[in-house]
Image (cartoon, rainbow, N blue to C red):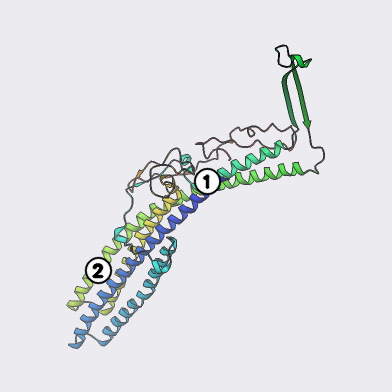
Amino acid sequence: TAEAQCFQLEAAYLTLSSNVVVAAITEASLRAQIAVTERTIEIQRETLDFLRRRFEIGQAARYDVATQEAALAQSIATLPPLRNQLSQQRNLLATLTGRTTAHVPADTFELDALNLPQTLPVSMPARMIEQRPDVRSAEANVHSAGATVGVATAAMLPQVTGTLIYGSTATSSDLLFSDLLGPTVTVGGSFAQTLLDGGALLARRRAALAAWEQAKSQYRSAVLTAFRNVADSLRALEFDALTFQAAANAESAARLALDITRRRLAAGDAGILDILNAEATYQASLMALVTARAQRYSDTAALFQALGGGWWNRDAEGNAFPAKRPECGAPAHPPAPQPWPDSRPRVTAPEAPPAPQPVTVMRGSPAAPPSPEAPQPAPRASKGSWGSRFF
């Protein structure tokens, strides 16, 4: 149906937007990793220069210099793969934004320029369902399938038509235009019923019922998937905060340890293995911190996607605008912002699916005669009451 296709379009737009955001975050993460590697190379070069000077005056062994040279070469070797990944990520952004690789966007993304949102648009479970375009599309398919059941049921019933004609007659031509005409009333009717169709009508009704059951199952699956996506995203953000804090503490401790080791090396109290271990630990802690920051941003974007992405805030041209799009109905209750990160409200699925609501056959379709295979009535869900019809 047109409504289902409209929400399918919104779901595709949401997926594309999320992919662009994740690609931008990945680019920023790669740039930060390159910066960390370059900083590590700079530190290792400073250490190598110091060891070479000590070797020239006989205060360091050739082994120490060679070991530091090997460590520096290994760090330099990690730069080309990172730069290659960055180039591929830029090409991906060009593709996602509808451009060729020859017209890569000039804008670049840096991890330090990204910030977490101050609030999270977390919604109640019942309201969240009407924000997800995939759920709305599945519900529109249920409505369409239910209508098809009503049509197939009506086709099996007798077709009765009636006519009523009121007029007047004249007994002679002289009375044709006079007021003495006699009134006449004609009543007629017809009754039609297919007797032999080889079971075609019954088969069509059964096929419509099967399609309706399939649509309801797909709707239920879409709703459960929506709850799972939001729950997973909220849990991921909770653990991301813990991971980021631990990575920040590790980076601070590793930086302090490296500074102390370099001072000890200058005083002659530390050997080459001490400085190599300190440099490796510091580089690993920096990389872990960059990864934790990027993962936090990516999981935040995933939460926005799981909550529907705010498609109802765009106009028909796709621009941000606080009004619903003319093609699709906006949710009746937009999500209220929640504080971040001190309080993280969680969205959880209800313990049991709601009971089915009583519904009737499509308007205009007569009720089916009682039989062992009589179909269930077609759903007639009202606008604005999403998510509790087809469980």
Q: Is residue 281 visible?
A: no
> Please, what is the three-letter code of the amino acid marked with disc 2?
Ala
Question: The C terminus lies in which quarter of the figure?
Answer: top right
Left or right: 243 as drawn, with respect to 380: left
The residue that appears at 31% across and 79% down in the rendered structure is 71
Q: Which residue is mark 1?
A: 135
The residue that appears at 39% across and 54% down in the rendered structure is 239
Question: Which is more toward the observer, 85 or 37?
Answer: 85
Give the vertical position of 89 relative to 223 (above or below).
below
Mark found first going from the N terminus, 1 or 2: 1
Q: Picture coordinates of residue 187 (x, y %)?
A: 76, 22
- C-alpha separation, residue under disc 1 versus residue under disc 2: 53 Å
Query: Judging from the image, what secondary structure is the residue with disc 1 in?
Result: helix
Q: How many marks?
A: 2
Q: Picture coordinates of residue 156 (x, y %)?
A: 74, 37
> Please, what is the three-letter code of the amino acid marked with disc 1?
Val
Proximity of marks 1 and 2: CB atoms separated by less than 8 Å: no
Q: Is residue 110 visible?
A: yes
